[in-house]
Image: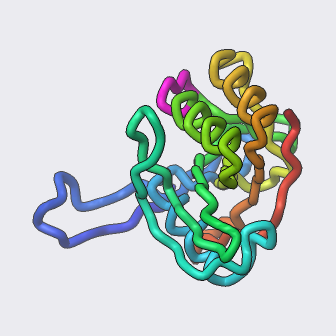
Amino acid sequence: IWFSRSSDPKRKLPGTWEIGETPHGRLACINTGRANGLVEEALRAGVIAELSGFSGLKREVPYGQERSRVDFRLDYPSGPAFVEVKSVTLGFADSTVAAFPDARTERGSKHLRELAALAREGVRAVQLYCVNLSGIDAVRPAEEIDSAYTAALREAVKAGVEVLAYGVDISPEGLRLARKLEVAL
């Protein structure tokens, strides 16, 4: 494993588990808190072509009927785009396809319902999977783990929610959102 240290006296523990090697020899960014920072860096650098050209970026913006907070609100001349980010680390031995979620997630389903409601109103809504696992070419819903999330994802897509996946280049020296991946619904 690789970890970072902090001297912040407010922290409960001085270290954070950052990267681990799986039994299949892949590197995985275990610190799910890194996903939003990686996505913001990639957005600002224009790495995510589908979301380029925005004039403003805000994080953790309240929205929707269920009082959620969306990870990013991007402002465009044509109107806002709401982007929800999920960190993906679930991989399988002989597969280059990762899956989300790795545990049941009512919160994840709620976020999809909120995005779907926005899309039905004509507002751009995006579910972005930040794949924090090396050796992956595609991502899919983990229906075998959370069928309710998978159903919510499929409904969101029908409502007009865009689904994107981007892979992270992972090394002990750093992390970088680098490449678009296939989404297998």
Colouring style: rainbow
Q: Which residues are magenta?
A: 103-108
In the rendered view, would you say 97 is above or below 177? above
Q: Position of residue 142 (x, y in %)?
A: 72, 26
Residue drawn at the location 67% of the way across and 25% of the way down:
152
Name the quadrant containing residue 65.
top left
Q: Is residue 24 above or below residue 82?
A: above
- Residue 78: x and y in percent read 70, 70
The quadrant holding residue 149 is top right
Q: Is any part of residue 92 visible from this angle?
A: no
Q: Nearer the viewer, residue 162 or 37?
A: 162
> Is 10 placed left or right of 13 in the picture?
left
Please give the name of the residue rendered at 67% of the width and 35% of the height, measured from the top-left corner.
Answer: 100
Residue 106 is situated, as x and y percent measured from the top left of the image, at 50, 24
Q: Is residue 87 left or right of residue 106?
A: right
Q: Is residue 84 visible?
A: yes
- Residue 97 in the image: x percent, y percent? 84, 40
Which residue is pictured at 66% across the width and 52% down the height? 123
- Residue sitting farthest toward the left: 9
**Residue 104 forms part of the magenta stretch:** yes
Front in this rendered view, residue 62 or 168? 62
* Picture mark count: 0
